Image (tube, rainbow, N blue to C red):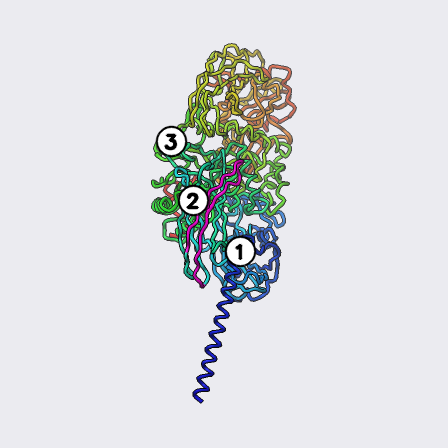
Amino acid sequence: MISTLYSAIKNQILHKMLKNISLFRIYLLALFVALTAFKADDTLPLNGTWLFQTDLDDKGVTEKWFLNKLTDQVNLPGSMAQNLKGDDITLKTKWTGSIYDSSFYFNPHLAKYRKPGNIKIPFWLTPAKHYVGVAWYQKQVTIPKTWAGKRVVLFLERTHTETRVWVDDKETGMQNSLVAPHEYDITQHLTPGTHRISIRIDNRIKDINVGPDSHSITDHTQGNWNGIIGKMQLQAAAPIYFEDVQVYPDVKANTARVKIQVHNSSIQAFNGQVILSAKSFNSKIIHQTQPVKTVINLAAAESKALEISLPMGKGTQLWDEFNPALYNLTAAISQKGVAANQQQTEFGMREFTIKGNQFLINGRPVFLRGTVNNCEFPLTGYPATSVEDWLRIFNIARAHGLNHMRFHSWCPPEAAFKAADRTGFYLQPEGPSWPNHGSSIGRKLPIDQYLYDETNRMAKYYGNYASFCMLSAGNEPAGNQVQYLNAFIDYWKKKDTRRVYTGMSVGGSWPVVPDAEYQVRGGVRGLAWDKRPESISDFSEGIAKFAVPFVAHEMGQWCVFPDFKEIKEYTGVYKAKNFELFEEDLKDQGMANQAHDFLMASGKLQALCYKNEIEKTLRTPGYAGFQLLGLQDFPGQGTALVGVLNAFWKEKGYITPKEYARFCNTTVPLAQLPKFVFTNNETLEAGIMVAHWGKAPLNNAVFKWTLKNDKGAVITQGVFQPKSITQGNGIPVGQIKWPLNTITQATKLKLEVSIANTTFANDWNIWVYPAKPAEVKTEVYYTTTLDDNAKAVLNKGGKVFLNVAGQVVKGKEVVMHFLPVFWNTSWFKMRPPHVTGMLIQDKSPAFESFPTDFHSDLQWWEITNRAQVMVLEDFPAGFKPLVQPIDTWFLNRRLALIYEAKVGNGKLLVSSAGLGPALGDDKPAARQLFNSLMQYMASDKFNPTGEVSFDVVKDILVSPTKYQFNTFTKDSPDELKPNSNQNKPKSNE
């Protein structure tokens, strides 16, 4: 009996042992298959139709929706809005973003745009649908038998924002990133056969509050979308794999230090080799390294870090903006000569460093000419994930002379880095946060750790890209910012030397973060055109207190009138309802037929402002660069039309890339002019300079200059002695002196400076007027008072020049500077100026002795800066002034600076600019304009076509404008607050 029992137990034990041995052999076989059958393209695409269901009450986890089939469907990659899922836009839509001008919700003037079916939001573009909350996505997948024994990862290139994933009934984890792919190792939950993958996405702002205006989430730009975009796939590979591969170029040593993290997820030890090699792939001459092999031994479930030096050998090609040479690093894990796993990583051999107050690329000085990218993608509402789309953007920026791009409070997808690498752009991505307006840093809130986590993810996924040269934690914070950002910068300086670091990109009133390797700040930018325009001054005084590179923060912000032809371009998720509102309002004000003229005239002034501000930075020795806001429009924050390109990166028609690149380029000739308006008893004196940031010095460069009249005829010209030019700003070339006494009548001239045998040239308009204007004999009655005498002259059929400067009541609230609107009047609560340039009837004989184009130019500065304007709200429909200031598109008031009209039996010319016979030598342009107008009025050509009653004319001096603007909102943007408020968040105290 005992013997029989013993025999049975023995047989059972032997059976189990044999079974375990068989299982182990099966495992080894599977492992061998996984190692030897590795293929880089072993993936299962997940794009296509997914089941879908919204979960506004957030009950899906409790009710275990992952066990059931969802009730709706969508196409991925994409967003809910793209699939027309979510809520309709109403007045109660809870937007993600600050609104500082809430007049839209209360203004009777805009009531029709608040009606259901005709809602037109003026603050930003309008999505097809809007949804903030939880949504579920579900797909059935079939895992092939060949994946047995392989490591399987669910790869979601970009989601918005928090994801949780279930495979069948098993939850595999949660991830929350706005900057990097969400990757889930779901190996243990998958076997060959059919499985259900359920993904729960939550785009609410919860404990981690990056700030509602952060461009990573805000409705001001890309929108707070819910969905998955980019690459979506299951990836199968060997269980021995690279967790991370980071390349650290050492240009001086001609090596690439490669830091590798290798993991063995199997239950068996692994003994093999790591093999590294690199090969250039986008250069005319192919360069390849010799492979380097390193032994690696891994226990089961072990990770190991390696640092391997890869000699680049002879012929190494360095990366920069002029020669963006790139390499593919191939890292392979091999066992007994068989590749178990392999990974390719792009990198460039470059060093982006700092010396004093200058950036260096591979030891050569570089000046950053950048623009701010705010994630403007109107067709999709989320960023592009294809290299082709980003190549288009960078090539357009390059055509305008740029070499740098900042990503305001967001980080672009990998495709942007790939495209920037190929086009030679220096990038500053940022942590995905504008921690203000309800958020703050340095107060032990979740955002503090999140910014470390997110920037670490950025370094892991994009750190090898040569274009990733700079890093900022975000934009304009509130909170205990200096202490927090000092620690942030110190952490990164110690951890990763491949780029340079600043705290956050900030305005000029934010506190200085002393540990920053470079500063991105406002305060040292802009045009000081409260004084007479000139081109001698620079920003030296403003940057002198900084010992590190200083980059101008959000330079420009000069506005242009909307281009309503752009409306038809919005064929995707977003519609330009804001543009539709502005266009309809312009029509209601009787000026619909002037829209294009307003665009072109205001655009010329905008381009003039960008030219002069950029040139001022290029005159400044030691200035390190600028970040424009922007080359392209910003569709939110009240609709900020600050670009010479629209939100689609398309031209608007008033300046070409070639014209723009004359004053924004690697090499730009410069002219130091004390003023732009002269009289013919003066001498034109101009210092000629150059800013040169080319690949090499200019040797024996020959600078030529010409002075031409408005017909293109050369008046005079000259050539400077050959000069060698090194890299730098504001490098002197020579002096021009030319007496203007040969010019006998009012003349517009163009000074052009060019560099022989190059494409580099630049030009400036100047005006020359007679020192003693021609005497005008006329019976015109000049007056500053619309009195009985003036009325009598008009009744008798006479001519009256009425100067009402300083007396305007109807329009008193409209503030005109020569400079255009800054950013927009909505975001800044109607902060002046309110006018965006002027439309001038330049073909009128009124300007026969005052050369002018149809738009503002610098000869108009002394006439228009701080001048009053008149609101013509009661004038006849279609009435057009001689000089028409262009109002902010939020109000579209019909304005005038100078107009002519038939009044009674007579003829009247009215000016609210200070024009009159007493003008002296200090205002030559105003004096010449007055003289030209008086000559016109004295001639038979003075024959106004518009008729206006005497009472309507007089009412401008008596009655206020019927419609007075009210923002209704108490809160203000940071720039309008006392400096002390910028460290005080609204909440989270």
Q: Secondary structure at mark 2?
A: strand
Where does label 2 land, which residue? 310
Please determine whether, in this image, residue 817 is positioned above or below residue 710: below
Bounds of the magenta segment: 267-296
Q: Residues within 10 Å of mark 3 (few under 14, many from 20)?
A: few
Where does label 3 land, which residue? 542
Residue 123 spot, x, y in % from top left: 54, 43
Please determine whether, in this image, residue 766 is positioned above or below residue 109: above
Whether tag 2 and tag 1 are in contact, CB under 8 A, the answer is: no
Residue 750 spot, x, y in % from top left: 53, 19
Earlier-in-chain disc, 3 versus 1: 1
Where does label 1 land, which residue? 38
Q: Residues within 10 Å of mark 1 (few under 14, many from 20)?
A: some
In magenta segment, residue 271: yes
Q: CA distance from mark 2 to mark 1?
A: 25 Å
Whether tag 3 and tag 1 are in contact, CB under 8 A, the answer is: no
